[in-house]
Image (cartoon, rainbow, N blue to C red):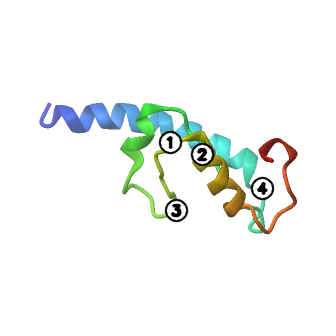
Amino acid sequence: MENPTLALNFEQIVPLMQLITQALGRTVRSQNDKGALVLLDYRAELLRGLDREFIITKYTNLELLKSDLHEFFKDYPVIEELK
């Protein structure tokens, strides 16, 4: 194998991308939909730079995540669970 690191990343990234695509497909049904996907998986860091459609932010603070989700969805009806 020429580059074992590349093979390992590929082995981890492909299944993760399949899961992400499936999850986003359930969230975003039309061009007018907007969705956020929170990944609780260490492999999410491997996605940095792969796709310009993804904004990857690593959170270590749940309150900051909630705040950013509120900002992301500010023009949509309030989701009671996020209050």
- Residue 58 screen position, x and y as percent: 46, 46
Element marked by disc 1: helix
- Which residue position is annotated with label 1? 17
Locate the N terminus by quadrant.
top left
**Which mark's residue is nearer the viewer, 3 or 1?**
3
What's the residue type where badge 2 is placed? Thr
Say left or right for 62 vs 35: left
Alpha carbon of mark 3 to alpha carbon of mark 2: how far?
12 Å
Element marked by disc 3: loop
The residue sitting at 87% across, 60% down in the picture is 77
What's the residue type where badge 3 is placed? Glu
- Which residue position is annotated with label 2? 21
Q: Is residue 83 above or below residue 43?
A: below
Alpha carbon of mark 2 to alpha carbon of mark 1: how far?
6 Å
- Which residue position is annotated with label 3? 53
- Which residue position is annotated with label 4? 29
- Residue 63 screen position, x and y as percent: 62, 45
Alpha carbon of mark 3 to alpha carbon of mark 1: how far?
13 Å
Q: Is residue 13 above or below residue 70?
A: above
- Residue 19 screen position, x and y as percent: 57, 36
Earlier-in-chain disc, 4 versus 2 = 2
Earlier-in-chain disc, 4 versus 1 = 1
Earlier-in-chain disc, 4 versus 3 = 4
- Residue 7 screen position, x and y as percent: 26, 34
